[in-house]
Image (cartoon, rainbow, N blue to C red):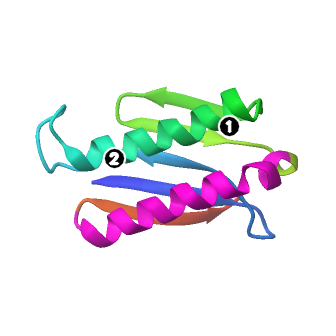
Amino acid sequence: MIRADFFANADGALLGFSVLGHSGLAQEGEDILCAAVSSAAYMTANTVLEILHITPISLRAEDGEMLFRVSDTDARTCRSLFEGFKLHLLGLEEQYPENLQVRYAEV
């Protein structure tokens, strides 16, 4: 199962996300859900890094895992991207409830 956690501050502003695991729908390299989640996560992180030129306070990307978090001061600039990514994953969770879980954590 893929677990996606979105980090929010006390005001509810999204600060980033963690994506961990594999969906188990198919073999690695052939799994459409893993590909969809990974692609959207990398697009979100790359846009923050390369287009918005924001340096995250936490960044880790390995096979089956990504952690990306910005500071409270950068949350407003990243809001639309993080909200869009969250909506994308919530839609995928509706389609694949046994393979993807989206959660929220206050930091």
The image shows residue 34, relative to residue 103, as above or below, that is above
What residue is at 61 percent from the left and 40 percent from the top? 68
Q: Position of residue 81 (x, y in %)?
A: 63, 52
Q: Amino acid at mark 1?
A: Val
Q: Residues within 10 Å of mark 2 (few under 14, many from 20)?
A: few
**Residue identifier under label 1:** 48
Quarter of the image for residue 29 reads top left
Q: Secondary structure at mark 1?
A: helix
Q: Position of residue 59 (x, y in %)?
A: 62, 31
Q: Residues within 10 Å of mark 1 (few under 14, many from 20)?
A: many
Q: Amino acid at mark 2?
A: Ala
- Residue 97 disc label: none
Mark sitting earlier along the chain (1/2): 2
- Residue nearest the observer in this picture, 42 or 107: 42
In the rendered structure, the answer to whether residue 92 lies left or right of residue 98 reads right
Q: Position of residue 43 (x, y in %)?
A: 52, 38
Q: How many marks?
A: 2
In the rendered structure, the answer to whether residue 50 lies left or right of residue 25 reads right
In the rendered structure, the answer to whether residue 8 lies left or right of residue 61 reads right
**Residue at the extreme right:** 73
Q: Which residues are magenta?
A: 74-98
**Residue identifier under label 2:** 36
The image shows residue 28, relative to residue 89, as above or below, that is above
Quarter of the image for residue 52 reads top right
Is 78 within the magenta? yes
